[in-house]
Amino acid sequence: MAHSAHGSAAVGWAFLFVACGSDLTGPEAGPAVQAALLSITAGDLRDRVELIAHDSMQGRATPSAGLEMTSGYIVQQFLAFGLRPGGEQDYVQRFPVAAGSIDAPNVIGWLEGSDPVLRDQYVVFSAHMDHVGIGAPINGDSVFNGADDNASGTAAVLELAEAFALLNPKPRRSLVFITFSGEEDGLIGSLSYTDHPTLPLASTVANVNLDMIGRNWTDAIAAISSSRDLVQTAEGVQEDHPELGLRVIEDPWPELDLILRSDQYSFVRYGIPGALFTSGLHADYHQQSDEADKIDFEKTARVTRLMFYFGLRLANADEVPN
């Protein structure tokens, strides 16, 4: 998650949190849905976070060799899941950093929806794969591994992509999975995507952004959104799936302006309903101590399963969220 760096650029934005009145929920039943859901596991999430947040990734700064290794891993995973390439170079969209002298990757894969009309609309899941790199050593540790920020959200997007790829039939709308870089440098990767989209932005009906989902509460996740519909849909999933053991809490930290501080803002500024799901900040935020062994992977799996149900409802709803 980025430091607050948008200031007056975002102050003028205001949104009417108006529920459209339509039913955005639907039953989740049947063996195909359950089989896909069961592919989301704490063990898989642990393996993914430990890889992405490994010292060899050198903190995944934008740009860096470690970030390129991370994006290469995600490309390989999207290819293995059978996702369609959504970038300008297969799965990769590159954008300029450092005044254009060098570039960095976003990774984009997608699944076509099953409805002949609604498949031309897109629900986007996203997480930033970058972190802040290397700094002065503390107790001999110079690597800012960013396990919670944001290997946790990136791992969840990979698990969601795998789960939805297993689902047959697919949801009615198309689903897009993006791992952005440059989030820690002012959301530059997601801003580049929304300014130069590789899939039609006008047909993007929602962005679901996951950032720091592996720590703090064991029984809750915060929903910070420009859209009351999205919050109500998430609350409906919570109510219908008590087995997940999660409460959806609407923005418990309004003073932090977190709606402006992660990649959902890049969609919100174009009027696209966006929601940040997060467990919030902690003492290891932007410290070398943000390590994989501090992540609650059992909780992270339950959050990811809630996001699976949430995405299913958004992709199958008759109406789009406001």
Image (cartoon, rainbow, N blue to C red):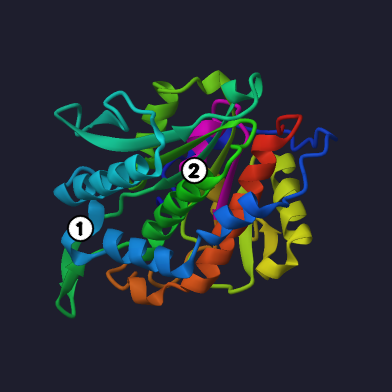
Give the magenta range. Answer: 261-277
Q: Are marks 1 and 2 in contact (CB under 8 Å)?
A: no
- Where residue 277 appears, as percent x and y from the top left, is 57, 53
Q: Secondary structure at mark 1?
A: helix
Q: Is residue 45 left or right of residue 217?
A: left
Type of residue at label 2? Ala
* Crowd class of label 1 (few under 14; some 14 to 19; many from 20; radius 10 Å): many
Residue 124's label in the rendered image is none
How many residues crowd mark 2 within 10 Å: few (<14), some (14–19), many (20+)?
Answer: many
User: Mark 1 = which residue?
Assistant: 57
Measuring from the top left, give residue 320's x and y in whole percent: 71, 30
Please give the name of the residue rendered at 58% of the width and 21% of the height, measured from the top-left corner. 120
Residue 113 magenta-highlighted: no
Q: Is residue 9 visible?
A: no
The picture quadrant where one finds residue 202 is: top right
Quadrant for the C terminus, please: top right
